Amino acid sequence: MVSWEDISARLKEISLLEKTLALLSWDQETYMPPSGARVRSEEISLVVRLWHERICDPVWDEILNSFVSRDDLSTDQKRILEIFKRDRDKEVKIPVDLATALATAVSEAFQAWHEAKKASDFSLFLPALDKVFQLSLVKAAALGYERQRAYDAFLDLHEEGLTEEVFDPIAHETLGIMQRVREAIQEKGTPPAKDFLRQVYPREKQKSLCEWLLPCLGFDTQRGRLDTSPHPFSTTLARDDVRLTTRYDEHDPFVALYGVLHEAGHGLYEQGFLSEWEHTPLAQAVSLGIHESQSRFWENQIGRSLEFLEWIWPTMQHIFSPLLDGWTPQKIFHAVNEVKPSLIRTEADEVTYGLHILVRYEIEKKLFHGEIGLGDAPEVWNSLYHQYLGITPPDEARGILQDIHWSHGSFGYFPTYLLGNLYAAQWYATMQKTLDISSLVKKGEFGPLLQWMRENIHYHGRRYEAEVLVKRISGEPLRPRFFAQYLKGRYEAVYGISLSLS
Ligand code: ZN
């Protein structure tokens, strides 16, 4: 019988290889000179191969077939093995030939996507994308799914347990909510003044604001750091080494500020796992949707509130003096919460953001159902944008070619972003029952909010699945009405209009 010491040493090796991959990718996105790319991709392939070999090691078959009945293992140790078995099964089910073919197809598709986007011509992307899509269907079959729902296999890959059947009613209800808010604001709302954007906010000053903010939120800067990258992201090199990035726009200090709040939300989650479970699934995030709920909570529920702006205002005025003279937290509150349908998902406000997601979800569903072919996708894209957001993309670069995800074969990924918004609103409503969030935020006392997240979410790692976690915390399953309630409170205050959402 394999001892727990041996099992945990094996789990640790797998985790160390994952963290090494994270380091190689982090460096690639931040500091690596372009000429480093060739060897970097070889390094990454090597580490992926070692990781795959460790995971597929036959010794695991013995361990994973017998752990349930062992009485020398604790409940937590058994839970760790149960989660690991589920992850491993997915990895083992994909034949090596298929994985290699997909990796090649993806790297070709990535190049093709790049060129197609530059030329704003989807037809240049189509053949390579088709190859990725066909191989993805084979992958779905290898992973297995029920009732001919191949798309479910992909939804589950990104959000464990998610299926069309689960997501459809959520998508339907959320679509109605978002469209009603968007229409009401477009009809009755006054656009905010934004002439503070005409000035230049020196990058160094923006950076010092962000670096001052992180510890205020509870992000431990001894166990993490902030860097710059064109597309902000966060990654974990270790529980005690969490990397965040942001980008700076010289004319708009709020781009970096909200970028940092978002990534800090991810980072606080990663710093909040218990050290005793390091290198096991009990020190991992539940799912992408739950991860995104952490970033959205700090960025939107907290960071875009009037109370937060009132708290941070004196510091911003001091750092950027005299650029913000004449502006008030109330005016900025309006400006940073502007709702306006736009073409690009990553630039969308929190009301219309989900509409961008649902366009992609509908298209992916139709593709996997065989209702449309990839060649029909641009037309469906444009008509859904018209239907959901009331706008039509002027070209494919700003339409169907804007996202990198499909070139990666990451079908089924988009819904996790929307789930993040919904979970964040449900956490907010639940937290509100025991904490006076507004008055804490107004004083910059974020500790109790973070402690609530730690105790309810972070400390558990993957002990509970998302579905179980949300019921434990809020007493009910994920409900879009919490999002509706949050949007109503926020946007009635921002626009001074009344919203009826029931
Ligand atoms: Zn995020």
Image (cartoon, rainbow, N blue to C red):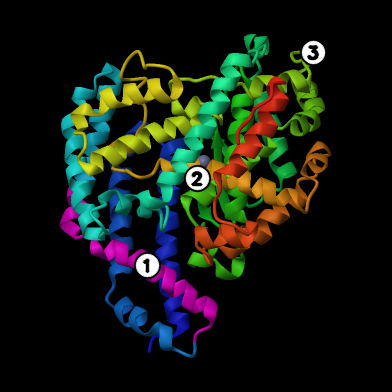
Q: Which mark is residue 330?
A: none
Q: Is residue 328 left or right of residue 51?
A: right
Q: Which mark is residue 325?
A: 3
Residue 495: give x, y in percent of width and height: 69, 20
Question: Mark 1 against mark 3, which lies toward the viewer?
Answer: 1
Residue 16: give x, y in percent of width and height: 44, 62
| Magenta stretch holds residue 153 | no
**Can see residue 277?**
yes
Specify the segment rendered in magenta.
Answer: 73-101
Residue tagged by mark 2?
A: 419
Beta carbon of the mark 1 residue lies under 8 A of ligand 1: no
Question: Mark 3 against mark 2, which lies toward the viewer?
Answer: 2
Task: Assign a secondary structure to mark 2.
Answer: helix
Residue tagged by mark 1?
A: 86
Q: Residue at x 27, y 24 (%)?
A: 378
Residue 460: give x, y in percent of width and height: 59, 64
| CA neighbours of label 3 inside 10 A, class few (<14), some (14 to 19), many (20+) | few
Residue 421: give x, y in percent of width and height: 55, 41
Alpha carbon distance from label 3 to label 2: 39 Å
Identify residue type, mark 1.
Answer: Arg
